[in-house]
Amino acid sequence: YTWRKLLNQLSSNLGEFQSHHLCFIVIKPQVAEWQGVFFTDMNANKNGHTRLEGTAGLSIIDFTMVRSTPKPGNPVWKDKSQAEVLVPNNISAEYIDHIAFM
């Protein structure tokens, strides 16, 4: 798959997405149960982040911050809004639920 083929498969109107700035690739939940998958409470490259393996890692994410209105001048929001899921291998297209552009 190429990125363009995948987008064509998931959406019939690519034109509207070109002006959007954020892209969320929503993967199926069972990926969280794969061995070696970790969740972090902020950017994994940042010193001081916390990480937990598997679905237990969901407990360290501050979903209120992740879903909140952007507050770029607030360092706590900046850190907590960058929570991540780390997957040790490629995720094949069959595990992509949908793609959202904002």
Image: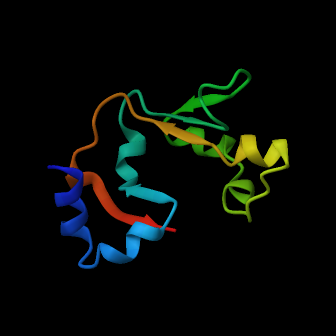
Residue shown at the point (41%, 27%) measured from the top left: 36
- Furthest toward the top, the residue is 47
Could you tell me how many numbered marks the image carries? Answer: 0
Residue situated in front as seen by the camera: 64 or 15: 15
Left or right position of 2 against 48? left
59 over 88 or under it: above or below? below
Residue shown at the point (68%, 41%) measured from the top left: 60
Residue situated in front as seen by the camera: 37 or 43: 43
What color scheme is it?
rainbow
Residue situated in front as seen by the camera: 62 or 70: 70
74 over 8 or under it: above or below? above
Point out residue 1 in the picture as x, y percentages from the top left corner. Answer: 14, 49
Point out residue 96 in the picture as x, y percentages from the top left corner. Answer: 30, 56
Point out residue 100 in the picture as x, y percentages from the top left corner. Answer: 43, 67
Residue shown at the point (69%, 27%) measured from the top left: 49
Left or right position of 43 against 31? right
Point out residue 82 in the picture as x, y percentages from the top left corner. Answer: 64, 44
Left or right position of 15 against 85? left
Q: Quadrant of residue 75?
A: top right
Residue shown at the point (41%, 58%) measured from the top left: 26
